[in-house]
């Protein structure tokens, strides 16, 4: 059975460099793989975030003599390690072994992970660039049976890839003082290159998959005829301000009331 990281309310996700990573994903057939390989890559990336552990090591550092510091000084290095088998990835995502292989290959190509060990016992090291990080809801979307939302995807069109890219982007731009993210269609188009006519379809896919809890639209105060940024509430948004412990009670996951829910049609 695949293992989730102690059913944490949320896990850390690198926000630094995320847009560059997402913009390298496209609905094009890559050499040695299918167009769906990039969709698989995002799913696997989320699973690796969920199951990773941290290993702290100390490495020697060269210290210039003029600083007057001990020559044997060391610095701590934190490695993000995900130990998971193909069988566990298959259970967690619902992907075929072929797509798992393609997804891992894409993550390696895009320098999001490195791998160590043999085929029988392989671990994946997540490459963290440092800097800003974001919270990704964990226990709200993952169970012992896997991430059920991923198992609703058909991997047959670009809209599902757009949806997953939008999901991670929405998570990355949330202010720590709020349980929702605010962004306009125009900015999504600028950041991710998703055409505005395709954004609403991506939103609907996330809602149908139960990855996005709700969307609010706000009227722009300065323009009577235009909409302001949407407010996006990820599934599990009530967990984002919960202390990250091993608690599994339901008291910390109560929803925060939100009104004016609207699903856009396409």
Image (spheres, rainbow, N blue to C red):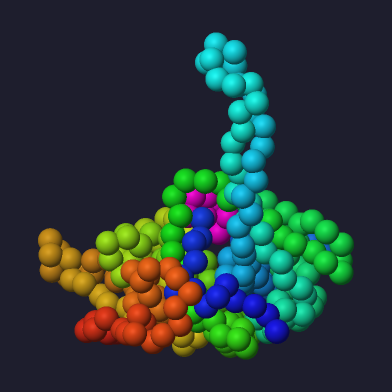
Can residue 265 be seen here? The reply is: no
Q: Between 14 and 210, which is closer to the camera in this rendering? A: 14
Prevalent SS, magenta region? helix
Quadrant location of the C terminus?
A: bottom left
Residue ID at (17%, 66%)? 220
Find residue 132 and report its horizontal and vertical position in percent. 44, 50
Find residue 38 and report its horizontal and vertical position in percent. 66, 67
Q: Is residue 6 above or below residue 17?
A: below
Residue ID at (52%, 15%)? 67
Can residue 254 be seen here? The reply is: yes
Q: Is residue 24 left or right of residue 181?
A: right
Start-end of magenta stretch: 15-23
Quarter-of-image position of residue 21 = bottom right
Q: Between 23 and 86, which is closer to the camera in this rendering? A: 86
Residue ID at (59%, 41%)? 76
Residue ID at (32%, 60%)? 176
Quarter-of-image position of residue 62 = top right
Farthest top residue? 66
Q: Is residue 43 left or right of residue 188?
A: right
Q: Is residue 247 magenta?
A: no
Marks counted in the figure total 0
Quarter-of-image position of residue 250 = bottom left
Find residue 51 and report its horizontal and vertical position in percent. 62, 70
Q: Between 126 and 252, which is closer to the camera in this rendering? A: 252
Find residue 160 and report its horizontal and vertical position in percent. 56, 76
């Amino acid at each position: 059975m695949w293992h989730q990281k102690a059913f944490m309310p949320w896990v850390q996700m690198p926000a630094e460099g995320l847009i560059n990573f997402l913009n390298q994903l496209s609905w094009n057939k890559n050499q040695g793989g299918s167009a769906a390989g990039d969709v698989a890559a995002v799913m696997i990336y989320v699973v690796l975030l969920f199951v990773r552990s941290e290993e702290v090591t100390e490495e020697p550092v060269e210290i210039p003599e003029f600083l007057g510091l001990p020559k044997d000084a060391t610095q701590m290095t934190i490695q993000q390690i995900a130990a998971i088998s193909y069988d566990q990835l298959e259970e967690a995502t619902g992907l075929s072994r072929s797509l798992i292989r393609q997804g891992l290959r894409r993550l390696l190509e895009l320098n999001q992970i490195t791998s160590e060990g043999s085929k029988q016992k392989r671990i994946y090291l997540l490459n963290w660039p440092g800097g800003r990080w974001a919270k990704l809801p964990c226990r709200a979307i993952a169970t012992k049976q896997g991430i059920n939302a991923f198992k609703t995807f058909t991997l047959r069109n670009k809209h599902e890839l757009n949806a997953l890219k939008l999901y991670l982007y929405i998570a990355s731009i949330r202010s720590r003082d709020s349980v929702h993210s605010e962004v306009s269609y125009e900015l999504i188009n600028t950041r991710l290159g998703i055409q505005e006519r395709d954004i609403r379809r991506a939103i609907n896919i996330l809602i149908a998959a139960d990855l996005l809890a709700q969307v609010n639209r706000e009227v722009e105060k300065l323009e009577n005829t235009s909409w302001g940024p949407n407010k996006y509430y990820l599934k599990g948004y009530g967990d984002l301000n919960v202390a990250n412990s091993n608690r599994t009670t339901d008291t910390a996951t109560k929803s925060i009331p939100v009104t004016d829910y609207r699903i856009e049609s396409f």
